[in-house]
Amino acid sequence: MAVDADALVRHGEVVMSARLQDLSRGGAALVAFAPPPHEARVTLELDGWLIDARVAWSVGRRFGLSFETPLRATDVLLFSRKGGSQPFVLV
C-alpha cells in the first residue's frame, strides 16, 4: 500500500527520521537522509509500534525493509487508510 507517514528507524544506538512510502505485510519502503547499511538489523517505529526488520535493499536515499514477523493484512489496510493513526498488532 502506498502511504506517506513519518517513521523512525533504530540501528544500534542511532535513531534516524525516515519517511514511509510503502507498507506491506512483509516489509516497507522508506526514504532517509542516510539509510542504514544493507542487511543491517533495525527496528522500525510507526505510530508508537516497534517492528523488527532488516535492510533488504538500498538505492540512494531510498531503502527497503523486510519484517521479521509479517503484519496482519487488516492492520496494513487500517494504517494506510488512517494515515498511521490506528495501532496495529504484530502476529
Image (tube, rainbow, N blue to C red):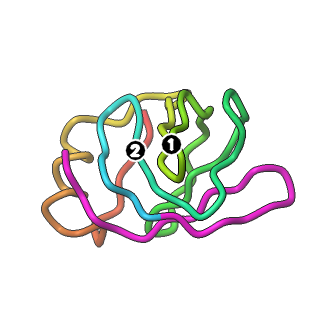
| Disc 2 crowd, CA 10 A, few/some/many (<14, 14-19, 20+) | many
**Tag 2, which secondary structure?**
strand
**Highlighted range, magenta:** 1-18
- Horizontally, residue 19 falls left or right of residue 8, namely left
Instruction: Please name the residue shown 39% across and 47% down the image.
Output: 89
Tell me whether the residue at label 2 lies in contact with that at label 1, contact meaning CB atoms closer than 8 angstroms.
yes
Question: How far across and down, in percent of the image, does residue 13 sit?
Answer: 86, 59
Instruction: Please name the residue shown 40% across and 42% down the image.
Output: 28
| Of residues 63 and 25, the one drawn nearer to the viewer in this rendering | 63
Instruction: Give the labeled residue for mark 1.
Output: 63
- Mark 1 belongs to which amino acid? Phe
Q: Which of marks 2 and 1 is nearer the N terminus?
A: 2
Question: How far across and down, in percent of the image, does residue 36 sit?
Answer: 69, 46
| Disc 1 crowd, CA 10 A, few/some/many (<14, 14-19, 20+) | many
Magenta span has 3?
yes
Magenta span has 9?
yes
For residue 78, which quarter of the picture?
bottom left
- Mark 2 belongs to which amino acid? Ala
Q: Is the magenta stretch mostly helix, strand or loop?
A: strand
Instruction: Give the labeled residue for mark 2.
Output: 29
